[in-house]
Image (cartoon, helix red, strand yellow):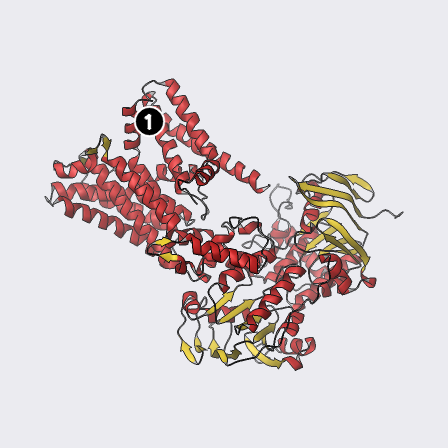
Amino acid sequence: MSETKLLEMKEITKAFASNVVLNGVNLSVGEGEVVAILGENGAGKSTLIKILGGIHRADSGEIRINGEEKQIHSAAVAGANGIRIIHQEIILVPGRTIAANVFLGRELKNRMGLVDAKKMEEETQKVIDELHLHLKADQLVGELSIGMQQLVEIIKAVSAEARIVVMDEPTSSLSQGEVETLFDIIRLLQERKVGIIYISHRLEELFAITDRIVVLRDGRMAGDVETGRADKDELIRMMVGRELSSYYTRNEHEIKGVSLEVKGLSHEKYFRDVSFQAHYGEVVGFAGLVGARRTELMKTIFGAFRKSGGEVCLDGRQLSIRRPQDAIDNGIVYVSEDRRGEGLILKNDVEFNMGLVCLSDFVKGVRVKKAAWRKMVDDYRKKFSIKITSPKQLTENLSGGNQQKVVLSKWLAKNPKVIILDEPTRGIDVGSKAEIYAIIDELAGAGVSIVMVSSELPEIINMCNRCYVMCEGRITGELAAKDFSQEAMMALATRHETAEG
Amino acid sequence: MEKTKSPGAAGAYLKRNAGTIIGLLILTAIVSFSTPKFFTSSNLLNLLRSNSVNAIISCGMLLAILMGEIDISVGSTVGLTGIIGAYMMTNLGAPVWVTVVSCLAVGALVGAVNGMAIAYLHVPAFVATLATQCIGRGLTEIISGGITIRVRNDGYTSLGNASIGGISIIILYAAFVLVMTWFLLNKTRFGYYIYALGGNKTAAQYSGVNVKKYNMLPYVLIGVLCGVGGIVWSARLGSASANLGSGFEMDAIAAVVIGGTSMSGGVGTMGGTLIGILIIGVITNGLNLMQINSFWQNVLKGVIIMLAVIIDVQRKKRSSRE
C-alpha cells in the first residue's frame, strides 16, 4: 500500500491481564471509504474501537492518521484528531434541544462570553438541512424517536467536522425508512471524503453500503475483503471459523389447537381493534416497521400495559390479566426486546437472574432452598451451552448472546404455554443467533406456542409458519409461509391509513 | 450476598469487605493507642450499647437503600414513637405491653404511609419521607408540649436498662435485628425481591414480581424498627423530649453507605453494613474518650464517610477494569 490512508491501525495488540483480546489486527480506512468490521461478540471489535477512541491504549502497534503516527491516549485527543464514535447506546441529554446536544462540550460563545444559543441553532439547522433531514434544531431530543436520536448523533459528528466516523450497530433500532435515511447520509459523508467504520451484524446492510469488510475472530484478523467480491457464506465461515450447517433451524412440526386468541384488543394510545390467533407448536411472526406498535401490543397482552378494550383468551377461556404476574400464572410469558433494561438485573449474577421468575417454586416455608435453584441453573447452562465462568458471574459482563440465553432460561423454567419473543436476536452475534433459532425450533417441536416479533424480515421468513404484519397500531395483513416475501411484508408494513394520517 | 459460617463464605466476606475492615482496624488501632480506656471490656460493651439503636435503624435504612431509595423519616419516627411511649406511660398510665404495641403500630403506620406514597402514588422516596419527617417531628413536639416527659415505670425503663449475663439487653435486641435482617435478605423470597427491585424494577415487574407490594413492605418494616428504636431510647433515658432521635437518619445512612451499599440500589450486604455501624461507633466512642468535642466529631465523621466512599468507588472501578 503506497498511498497514504486516512487512517491506519497496524499490528494492534491488546491484552487485559492474561486475556489477549486483540492480536496483530490491521485496519485501514481511506478517504470516502466505508469499511465494515464484522465479527462475533467477543471477537474484539469493540476493543479495537475503544483503542481508536482513546478509551483503551494498545499494548503494541501504531495508529497513523494521514500517515502521521498519533498517540491517542484520551477521548479528547481522539476528538481533536477528527475521530467520532457513535455508540450503540444513545448518549444524549433528552431534556435539551438538538442544538444544545450537538454543541455539548464545545458551546459557541458570544462577545460577552455567554453561550450563544441562537448561533448554535443556526449552525445545527445548517447541518440538518445539508443532510436533508426533517428536523428542527430547537426540538427537544427526548421528543424524537430512537431512530431520529441516532441521527442526532450523526449530526453531531458532521457538525464537529469529523474525518473518521465510527458507527457501532447504527441500525439496530432504526426502522426501514430510517435505515434508508442513514444510508443517504453515509453516501453524503463519502462524497465529503469522510472515512467511515461501520459495525453491524446484519450482512445485508454490509453488502448495501460498505466498500470493504474486515473480519475479526477471537482477536485476530480472519479476513479483509472487498465487498464486491465477498460472499455471504464465506463471511460467516470467516467469522465463526467453522461451517454453519444451517443458520436457521426449521423443522416440520405438528400444529395443534388454538392457544392464544386475541379479540379486538385496543390500547388508548398505541393500537386498536387487534385480533389474532396462535396455535400450539406454531411460530407466529409479527413483522412491521419500528413504531408499528408490536412491542406495545405484546406488553399489553402480557399485562405490563393496560388495555382499553378487547379480550385475551387462552385455550378458549377468557383471561383477566391486569399485571405481568397474571399472564405468567396463566402460562404466557414475554421475552423483552430490551434485554438490559427489562430482561436482566445486570448488577446481579446469572443464578439470581435465572431463578427470579420461578423463585416461588424454590421456597419451602419461609426459606429459599438453594439446591433446586442451583440444579436448574446448571441444567440450563449445559442445555444452552451458556458461556460463563460461574453462576455467580454478573450478567452485565456477559455477551449479548449469553445474556439472551440467561433470559430464555429464566422464562423456560416456568414451562410456559405461550412464549412471546420480542426481537429475540437483536444485538446478538451470528453464532448465538443460530443457537437461539435452534432453541425456538425445539420449543415449537415440544408443542409450545411461539409468538415472535422481529424487524428482520429474513428471520420471519425463515422461522415462522405464519405471520401478521402491523402498521401504526393495526394489523394490516396476514401471510401464510407460502406467501412470504420481503416485498409482500414491506407493502403491508407501509399500508398507512390515509383518513387520519 | 452470602455470609455463612463455612470457611469459603467467611473468606468471601473478608475479601468483599476488605477495605472497610482494614479501615475499622486502623481506626481501632489509632483510638487504642491514644487512650488506654478504649480497650476495656466495659468500654467496648458501652460502645456496642450506645450504637445499638443506630444498628437497628441502619438495618431498616439498608432495605430502603437496597431498593435504590432512601428513608430520611427514621429519626423523626424514633422521636414520635418514643414520645408516644413516654406519654402513654406517664400521662395515661397505660400498661407496658399496650404502650409497646402502640409504639410499634405507630411506627408501622408511618412506614405504611411512606410505602403507599412511594410505591403506589409514585412520590419520590426522598420527598415522601421528607414530608413524613416533618409531620412526625411536628407531632412529636405537639405531644411533648415542649417539655421533657419523664417515665418512672420500672417495667418500661427496664426495656432499655436490663441486662442478661452482664450484656445490656439493647445489644441483644440489635443482634437479633441484625441476624433477622441478614436472614430476610439472604434466605427469603422477600429479600431476593428487594435486590431485584433495586437492581432493575422493570425487569422485576416483568418477571412477575408484585413490585408495588414489595416496594411498600420494607417501609412498614423500617417503621416498626423505628418503633423499637423509640421504645428502647425513651426506656433507656427514662424520658423523652421533642428532639428525641433527631439526626439519627444521618448515622444510619452513613453506616449503610460506608458498608459498601450502592446508593443506586441492588448492591449491598448486611455484613458490610455491620462494619459501617461499627466504624461509626468507634469514631463516636473514641472521640468521646479522647475528649474531643462533638462539633469536631461531626467534622471527622463527614471526612471519614467521604473517604470510605471514595475508596470503595475506586476499588470497584479497578475491579471492573479487570
* Relative to B67, residue A492 above or below: below
Q: Position of residue A34 (x, y in %)?
A: 77, 57
Q: Position of residue B280 (x, y in %)?
A: 37, 32
> On the rendered structure, is A458 left or right of B223?
right
* Relative to B144, residue A86 above or below: below
Q: Position of residue A89 (x, y in %)?
A: 60, 54
Residue B70 visible, this orientation = no
Q: Residue furthest right?
A: A2
**Front-most of B179 and A244?**
A244
The quarter of the displayed image where residue A135 is located: bottom right
Callout 1, which amino acid? Asn
- Subunit that carries the residue with mark 1: B
Residue name at image x 45 percent, y 49 percent: B266
Image quadrant where one finds the C terminus of chain A: bottom right
Residue under label 1: B285
Q: Secondary structure at mark 1?
A: helix
